Amino acid sequence: MNDTQLDALVAAAAEGVDCDGLRVTADGDAYTFALPEETHEGLDESELRERATENPWFVSNWHYWTERDRPDAETAYLRWLEGADDRPVPERYEALADGGIEASWGELAIEIGLGDDGDRTYTLCHEDDANADTAALDVHTDPLEARELVKHDDRGRYRPLKTAPTLPTGWAFLDLDGRALARTVDIVYPATVANWHLERQGDLDISNWTETMERQTGIYGVIETWDRGEGHEHVNWVAEACCADSQCLKRREWEYDDDTDLDVDGGDGAFPCREPCSLVIAAARQWTKLEGEQPKTYEFELTPSEKEQIEDIIDAVADGEADDIREADVYEGANRYRTRFLRAKRFDEEGNLCGVPTDDEEN
Amino acid sequence: MQALVIVAHGSHLNPDASTPTYEHADTVRAAGVFDEVRTAFWKEEPSFREVLRTLESEEVYVVPLFISEGYFTEQVIPRELRLDGWDVAEWDSDGTSATHSTLEAGDVEKTVHYCGPVGTHDAMSDVIVRRAETVTDDPDVGEGFGLAVVGHGTERNENSAKAIEYHAERIGEMGRFDEVKALFMDEDPEIDDVTDFFESDDIVVVPLFVADGYHTQEDIPEDMGLTDDYRTGWETPAEVDGHRIWYAGAVGTEALTADVIIERAADAGADVGNAIEEIRRRTRVAGADGASVGD
């Protein structure tokens, strides 16, 4: 606590102070100073200052949460990170002073420590780096630098979906204030704090599948034709393919329509997903085109192991595990040598499985 | 408080598509006249759909970093931003003259000043000229030079070509270059035959595109004959049919584009102080302050 905070408290008494257990009121020149377990009435200003000075954590805590100019969503988010609504001030300050409070947001690890005069300082990194020595990390302080940091994953691949669980490691933001922390989080996971706050207030505006697809135009207008009155199984497939925790950290809140929930679980992410995103829309456009085809019967001859191998390959690719199968592990169906053997044996010169053409009429 | 939001296309596939948007946002931010400067994308995040709710400011200037008026500026962006009561007739545009429209957004309590695209603003002519200066490294380039302003062109949207023709005509009227032509990828006159349209030995080719990507880095260089295979690169200038082609790449990557963004917002009523002069000064091409080229 410092003199500025103390003077601000005395000045605010006339309006009434009520924050995390600290209550200060004024009745003319007589002040009341109250904490959860003690109340002092009829204090003059110097006695008020004395009581406040004896309880610096309560005063600086009040100052931090009420005397800073920040948007409601940001205040709610920063308070949530340190559990301000659930943990009494002394317990919280002891934790802040004793190594800091740890919080998480998607794959981000956020550490909140105690700054000067009861202020907060925030540190942000990938959760896998939370216990790393900062000397080993690429250290930043400007939130805008996060734009380039999160563009590619650890394998160097472009991340078009910011909430994909592929946040790169090896970096940290140090000594951020609350504003800079919120700004950095908004760059790593855009609009997640705003939507989280709306959801907590009961005001999250959800656009379900049908309404989101109805508003598409241009090349995306075709998606609407995917609904042919045959139920919504196709949207379950979309959600299972794209919106699982393994693919996106947002928790899907949108459903098929106002009356019809999808059968697929929405996931466990901290931040809500309020409508199908642009990646889902782009994928749905392609599936709409592909799903316009009629099924055909093909006849293949495969050994039982070859059939299982094809299933293994699809699983490995769909789960992103193809690259993890060891070079010489020919016991795995999706092993590269096993797959090359299958291709050598079962593909004809045109690349047709078992020599069966895709389209009979063309052959 | 006033905010500037630059809305752009972005890409699911190309990590560089958003780079010029970020860079211009940084330039405008450094000018310090907006309380907040943000970017939003059709294909990246934050989406058009969610950017407004991340702002504190109640006055928001939205500038589309697009080349032409048309599908995106008239339908997609107003729809996705939930600009209640949007009516393209309010722009009263001939295809290149849209300025701005003031509306309320449906999901936030903010006033949105929705501006015409960057590509059709008069100041974009200056950016095209600046691009010619940058690629030739000559702040006085013009005499003895032809300038080709290149657009995509499409049968589906006549405004796409209008923006290109508009700037070609304006730059032609400046009398700075010996010849100025509008050329296209997908309609006549085509960029493939660029040397047929110029008598000048030196031709600067400036594609009116926002970001460098498939068209500006693969299609156009190959179509013009700068290279047989874009992956092997090309010379600048490159010799084609007895002419020297100075290929500039996407005009939207030119730093001065930030100036057009601010001008759009200023035209819509934003208080931008002296930021326009400041950005013009700071993005000036090397050598433009009196030093001769090569110093």
Image (cartoon, rainbow, N blue to C red):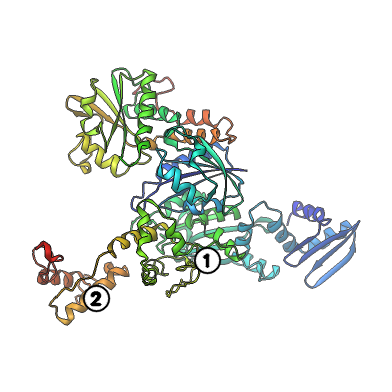
- The vertical placement of B23 against A242, above or below, is above
Q: Nearer the viewer, residue B70 or A275?
A: B70
Q: Quadrant of the C terminus of chain A?
A: bottom left
Residues flagged by tags 2 and 1 on a common chain: yes
Q: Locate residue A235, reporting x and y percent.
A: 39, 68
Q: Chain of mark 2?
A: A
Q: Amino acid at mark 2?
A: Glu
Assign a secondary structure to mark 1.
Answer: strand
Q: Locate residue A48, reporting x and y percent.
A: 85, 60
At x 24%, y 75%, the residue is A311
Q: Amino acid at mark 1?
A: Ser
Mark closer to the chain start, 2 or 1 = 1
Quadrant of the image occupied by residue B177: top left
* Residue denoted by label 2: A311
Q: Quadrant of the N terminus of chain A?
A: bottom right
Quadrant of the image occupied by residue A117: bottom right
- The vertical placement of B218 against A228, above or below, is above
At x 51%, y 32%, the residue is B263
* Residue denoted by label 1: A104
Q: Locate residue B280, reporting x and y percent.
A: 48, 29
- The numbered dot on residue A137 is none
Q: Nearer the viewer, mark 2 or mark 1?
A: 2
Q: Is residue A154 visible?
A: no
Label 2, residues with CA under 10 Å away: few <14, some 14-19, many ≥20: few
